[in-house]
Image (tube, rainbow, N blue to C red):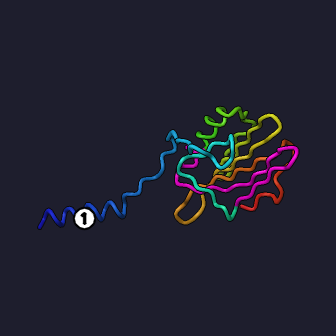
Amino acid sequence: MKTLIAALLFVAAGAVGGCTPPDPNADLSSQAVSPIADVPLPLSFEMDESQSKNLTEPGSGFRTVDHLFKGKDDKNAVAKFYRNRMKDTRWTNTLDRFDGGTWSLQFQKEKEQCDIRIFEKGLFPKTYIAIKLSPVGKPVDGGDKR
């Protein structure tokens, strides 16, 4: 009987207090196929389709992307992921800023720029990645409402 009570207490403690915070130093893995060609996405993130849009301009092939992703990895680990992984697809880091709890990273490649914001929100915080990709000098329409 004592063993049963001890086992139940162990399971209950794990259910209540077993949530460990995400590791800010983790080396995150990429999804095999990213929703944005040549912009990697950490494995645990999913697109919020209701908050995402993209357009490829006929003729020029220019892409305009405004996607929001939600996941569970630590925002610092996600920033580290982008610093390391964007180089693999020939993006050059042009901005790396942390302000008010939000990481703002900017990358440029040929005639495109990619702005990445990494932040947390919610009562039980989730990590969000807002990715905006556009031709250099042409910001994504609508501004940032997130």
The magenta stretch is 52-78
Which is nearer the eye, 140 or 123?
140
Callout 1: 10 Å neighbours few (<14), some, many (20+)? few
In the image, residue 116 sits, relative to residue 107, either above or below, namely below
Image coordinates for residue 135, horizontal then vertical, percent: 83, 44
Which is nearer the eye, 96 or 111?
111
Left or right side of 93 for 60 = right
Q: Amino acid at mark 1?
A: Leu
Residue at x 49% of width, y 41% of height:
26
Q: Secondary structure at mark 1?
A: helix
Left or right side of 81 for 25 = left
Residue at x 37% of width, y 60% of height:
17
73 drawn magenta = yes
Image coordinates for residue 52, horizontal then vertical, percent: 71, 59
Count of all numbered marks drawn on residues in the image: 1
In the image, residue 128 sits, relative to residue 60, either above or below, namely below
Image quarter in which the C terminus is found? bottom right
Image quarter in which the N terminus is found? bottom left
Image coordinates for residue 50, horizontal then vertical, percent: 68, 65
105 drawn magenta = no
Image coordinates for residue 21, horizontal then vertical, percent: 46, 52
In the image, residue 48 sits, relative to residue 105, either above or below, namely below
Residue at x 64% of width, y 50% of height:
118
Residue at x 67% of width, y 45% of height:
98
| Quadrant of the rendered image containing residue 38 | top right
Residue projecting furthest to the left: 1
| Quadrant of the rendered image containing residue 68 | bottom right
Q: Which residue is tagged 1?
A: 9
